[in-house]
């Protein structure tokens, strides 16, 4: 439902204009729609402009690995906030060096440009920072559920690029005294796209292909909601937030899922039943955000996505 259809906005924020990078991507397009529905003047930034048009939205084709172009765009638009979502995300489909250089350079350019202009930032990191998602060696959590303070030890270019991005975010928040909210989404599902996921048929987990997300997930609409919640929050400096549904998408005991992938868990386990292996408690406490969409309740619902792409 569009925000304009709601009598009271869920998150109140005093933002009249925003830049959204990665605006035509799987997450960015939903964020652009949600902000524009609230009446925010959005400038969407991506490599290419979309063919369609969208009320309250202008688009610019910008290569964010080019520092001057990035800074000029942000300085000229002079938005109230920057939402940085642009990135290459799959280390199995992109050359590692290209992915790493793209993600780190674009994060540096966007965050530094925003900082120089005194503009607060919300940006997307990833659960991949912890290292389990694309691990080649055995990866075992120190404790469950995994929270924002858990050690980050990625082996892959994508997770490493996001760890570097988080360090850049901390640096720019210190240097320019802006607020930077780092969002770490779990595996993102979209109601408008087919996405392969294991069935909930009670099959032998030992026969399933192990996956380092431990069946943790989040609906793309909830990612957009968390970005709004971060824009509305009175944050100081840098803060990171896991963005994840309450339960795993397999509908199976989570500790059992983790042990299937990792073996015995050495640390404390504070999970009950199907609770996600990743914790969303900090987002609830600090941002007032809780997931609103469960794939167990409506994975086949008919939802219209952005129409301007």
Image (cartoon, rainbow, N blue to C red):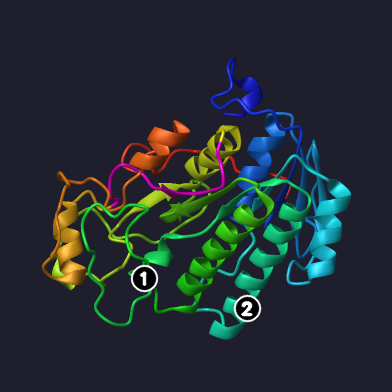
Secondary structure mostly seen in magenta is: loop
Which of 249 and 278 lies nearest the eye of the viewer? 278
The N terminus sits in image quarter: top right
Residue designated by label 2: 101
Q: Residue 165, relative to residue 137: is it above or below?
A: above
Identify the residue shown where x is 81% and y is 60%: 71
Which of 49 and 18 lies nearest the eye of the viewer? 18
Residue 235 x/y as whole percent: 55, 38
Identify the residue shown where x is 64% and y is 28%: 13
Horizontally, residue 202 falls left or right of residue 6, namely left
Residue 305 x/y as whole percent: 60, 43
Which of 214 and 139 lies nearest the eye of the viewer? 139
Based on the picture, tell me whether residue 73 belongs to the magenta stretch: no
Residue designated by label 1: 131
> Residue 245, labelled with which disc?
none
Based on the picture, tell me whether residue 241 belongs to the magenta stretch: yes
**In the rendered structure, which segment of residues is drawn in magenta?**
235-249
Q: Residue 124, relative to residue 308: is it above or below?
A: below
Residue 125 x/y as whole percent: 51, 59
Q: Element under label 1?
A: loop
Residue 148 visible somewhere in the drawing: yes
Q: Disc 1 or 2, which lies upstream in sequence?
A: 2
């Amino acid at each position: 439902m569009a925000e304009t259809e709601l009598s009271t906005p869920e998150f109140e924020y005093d933002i009249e204009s925003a830049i959204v990078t990665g605006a035509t991507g799987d997450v960015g397009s939903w964020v652009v729609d949600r902000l524009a529905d609230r009446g925010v003047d959005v400038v969407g930034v991506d490599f290419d402009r979309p063919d369609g048009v969208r009320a309250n939205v202008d688009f610019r084709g910008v290569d964010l690995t080019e520092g001057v172009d990035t800074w000029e765009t942000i300085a000229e638009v002079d938005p109230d906030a920057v939402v940085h979502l642009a990135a290459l995300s799959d280390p199995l489909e992109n050359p590692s060096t290209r992915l790493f250089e793209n993600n780190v350079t674009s994060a540096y350019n966007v965050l530094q440009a925003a900082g120089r202009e005194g503009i607060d930032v919300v940006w997307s990191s990833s659960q991949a920072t912890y290292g389990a998602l694309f691990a080649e060696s055995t990866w075992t959590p120190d404790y469950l559920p995994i929270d924002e303070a858990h050690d980050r030890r990625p082996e892959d270019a994508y997770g490493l690029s996001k760890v570097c991005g988080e360090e850049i975010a901390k640096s720019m928040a210190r240097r320019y005294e802006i607020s930077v909210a780092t969002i770490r989404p779990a595996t993102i599902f979209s109601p408008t796209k087919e996405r392969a996921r294991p069935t909930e048929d009670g099959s032998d987990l030992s026969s399933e292909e192990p996956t380092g997300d431990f069946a943790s997930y989040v609906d793309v609409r909830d990612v957009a909601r968390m970005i709004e919640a971060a824009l509305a929050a009175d944050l100081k400096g840098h803060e990171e937030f896991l963005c994840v549904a309450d339960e795993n998408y397999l509908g199976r005991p989570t500790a059992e899922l983790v042990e299937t992938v990792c073996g015995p868990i050495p640390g404390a386990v504070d999970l009950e039943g199907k609770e996600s292996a990743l914790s969303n408690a900090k987002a609830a406490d600090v941002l007032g955000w809780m997931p609103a969409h469960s794939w167990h309740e409506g994975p086949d619902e008919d939802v219209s996505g952005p129409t301007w792409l």
